[in-house]
Image (cartoon, grey):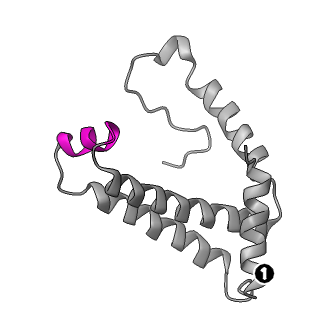
Amino acid sequence: MTDIKELQSIAKDFIDKRDWRQFQTLKDLAMNSSIESNELMEIFLWHDKNFEENIISGNDKETLNKIKNEISDILFSCLAIADHLNFDISEAYKNKMSELEKRYDVNKVKGKLIKIPSPDHKK
């Protein structure tokens, strides 16, 4: 199994072998992440629930491959940002999940559709 540090190293090597770091600003990487996220959303645009069911059931492998590609593009952007800022993305993820565990206590939210703003959320 591949761990996140290995994926981050693969992204770093890919960027460095092409000497692209000089062109990849944090702003551009963040924007790229958003654009790739929108490309993921576009796959689902104007389809009914049957569309999703066909993907989930394995009957639409072409769309599943498109989804995998877009998610990989999003992940690449995130890994590149973490590399540029020199932080361990797995540690950042664990910290975020710990925060979410506290905010969304399972005893209070289980089975409920609920959004609780983060303490640092600006109104």
The residue at the point 44 percent across, 61 percent down is 37
The residue carrying pointer 1 sits among few (fewer than 14), some (14 to 19) or many (20 or more) residues within 10 Å by Cα, namely few
> Who is closer to the viewer here, 16 or 121?
16
Using the rendered view, name the quadrant where residue 53 is placed: top left
The residue labelled by disc 1 is 16
89 left or right, relative to 35: right
Please tell me how many numbered marks the rendered image carries: 1
Residue range in magenta is 49-58
Name the kind of residue labelled 1 in the image: Asp
Image coordinates for residue 101, horizontal then vertical, percent? 63, 26
The residue at the point 59 percent across, 59 percent down is 75
Q: Quadrant of the N terminus?
A: top right
> Who is closer to the viewer here, 37 or 7?
7
The secondary structure that dominates the magenta segment is helix
Image coordinates for residue 40, horizontal then vertical, percent? 39, 59
Please determine whether, in this image, residue 98 is positioned above or below residue 34: above
Is 51 one of the magenta-colored residues?
yes
Image coordinates for residue 35, horizontal then vertical, percent? 45, 70
